[in-house]
Image (spheres, rainbow, N blue to C red):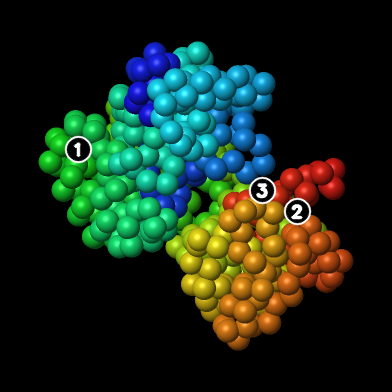
């Protein structure tokens, strides 16, 4: 990655970035931080992953309105990236590497005041760890995910993600897990970095109105605001309040219809599923919903057994369906159906999510929840948008 950046003239140099690592919550923290900065009058480059429907969602400029990178220009920058990769004979280059190079080049063109950059899977060897001038290093919830590449213990995963910490650059962490917190604090102190423990500050943010639902979003809001403050970026109280009230991340417990209620949620690992269950039960209680259908699909490299255990053990008044996802890493419906059976719950198996949704819509369910994968959420969001005039 560094050799390729040499060829491209280091477009990442001088980029004042809020650099975000973690297992869950990165995207929400990213859009909240960007929204606060935008309300304060700054222009912001936003680089997040994965995308929900369009790959150009990953690279945006926020300056009062949100502009995705034009697809034709995105294609040009990706080809420039691939040419540079070939020039240095870099061997295998991931799609994420090409996307990141394109984001760096686009931000070098647009020169935003700040950038919000989300890590991919890891931290230490993540291609975004080529940023030279981050203004703050941020850590969201860290859990057991991507264990094949990051390690199979919280200690190893946290150490990997802590690789983004730069000497003297402030560190902000939201985890209340003492193991995670102690590792990050120790590494931060060894590099002369200030350390902010957001878990002690979250209650201060209950006074704010949030666009995104769930108790975990309060934690994300606190993290975003504290990250901006730790970076020393001047923002007013009004900008913080307005930014958090407007910040929205599609596909994260997003209510896209009310008759019946249709919710799409990209939770894709056990920790995220657990938080989603808490949010869903509170939502159904408030709306007095008694009869719901949950449509589930996930990737086969995820802990699907644990996710099914949480979904069947934590929810009430819910029937279940599983669906295939048109993606090469998707788990098959036979395996998912067996997991629900082992958990003591019956489920209907569908060949695709659209069929599952059509049949569910024709029934008398008060609420349809689609969850388990960001790819499933994106598919269903696109399908719903195409077949309904309004959200």
Query: Which residue has dot 3 on it?
Result: 378
Residue located 72% across and 52% down the image: 380
CA–CA distance between discs 3 and 2? 15 Å
Does residue 145 appear in the picture of this structure? yes
Between disc 1 and disc 2, whose residue precedes?
1
Left or right of residue 22: residue 315: right
Q: Residue 388 carries which label?
A: none
Q: Mark 2 points at which residue?
A: 257
**Which of the numbered marks, if any, corresponds to residue 194?**
1
Residue 341 in the image, given as x and y percentages of width and height: 62, 83
Residue 220 in view: no
Q: Which of 349 and 168 is in front in this view?
A: 349
Side of 331 relative to 26 (left or right): right
- What residue is at 81 percent from the left and 62 percent from the top? 355
Label 1: which secondary element:
loop
Q: Residue 70, located in which quarter of the rendered image? A: top right
Label 2: few (<14), some or many (≥20) within 10 Å? some
Are circles 1 and 2 on residues that touch, CB within 8 Å? Answer: no
Foreground residue among 6 and 23: 6
Q: What element carries label 3?
A: helix
Q: In which quarter of the image is residue 123?
A: top left
Secondary structure of residue under mark 2: strand
Depicted 69 relative to depicted 314: above or below: above
Looking at the image, do the residues carrying marks 3 and 1 touch, with CB atoms under 8 Å apart? no
**Circle 3 or circle 2, nearest the eye:** 3
Among the two numbered marks 3 and 2 on one chain, the one whose residue lies closer to the N terminus = 2
Mark 1 vs mark 2, CA separation in Å: 44 Å
């Amino acid at each position: 990655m560094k050799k390729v950046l040499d060829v491209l003239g280091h477009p990442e140099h001088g980029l004042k970035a809020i650099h975000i690592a973690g297992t869950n919550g990165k995207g929400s923290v990213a859009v909240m931080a960007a929204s606060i900065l935008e309300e304060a009058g700054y222009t912001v480059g936003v680089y997040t992953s994965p995308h929900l429907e369009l790959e150009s969602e990953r690279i945006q400029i926020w300056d009062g309105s949100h502009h995705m990178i034009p697809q034709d220009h995105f294609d040009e920058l990706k080809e420039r990236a691939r040419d540079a990769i070939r020039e240095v004979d870099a061997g295998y280059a991931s799609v994420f590497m090409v996307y990141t190079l394109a984001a760096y080049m686009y931000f070098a063109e647009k020169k935003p005041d700040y950038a919000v950059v989300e890590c991919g899977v890891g931290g230490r060897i993540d291609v975004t760890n080529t940023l030279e001038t981050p203004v703050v290093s941020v850590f969201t919830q860290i859990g057991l995910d991507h264990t094949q590449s990051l390690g199979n213990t919280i200690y190893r995963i946290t150490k990997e993600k802590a690789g983004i910490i730069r000497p003297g650059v402030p560190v902000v962490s939201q985890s209340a897990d003492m193991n995670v917190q102690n590792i990050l604090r120790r590494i931060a102190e060894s590099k002369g970095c200030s350390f902010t423990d957001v878990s002690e500050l979250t209650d201060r943010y209950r006074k704010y109105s949030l666009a995104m639902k769930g108790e975990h979003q309060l934690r994300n809001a606190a993290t975003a605001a504290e990250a901006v403050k730790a970076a020393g970026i001047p923002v007013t109280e009004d900008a913080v309040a307005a930014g958090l009230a407007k910040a929205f991340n599609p596909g994260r417990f997003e209510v896209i219809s009310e008759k019946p209620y249709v919710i799409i949620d990209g939770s894709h690992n056990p920790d995220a599923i657990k938080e989603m269950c808490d949010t869903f039960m509170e939502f159904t209680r408030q709306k007095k919903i008694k009869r719901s259908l949950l449509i589930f699909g996930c990737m086969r490299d995820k802990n699907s057994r644990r996710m099914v255990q949480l979904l069947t053990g934590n929810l009430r008044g819910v029937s279940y369906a599983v669906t295939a996802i048109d993606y090469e890493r998707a788990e098959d419906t036979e395996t998912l159906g067996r997991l629900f059976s082992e958990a003591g719950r019956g489920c209907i198996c569908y060949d695709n999510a659209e069929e599952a949704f059509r049949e569910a819509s024709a029934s008398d369910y008060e609420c349809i929840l689609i969850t388990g994968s960001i790819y499933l959420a994106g598919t269903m969001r696109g399908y719903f948008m195409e077949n309904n005039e309004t959200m």
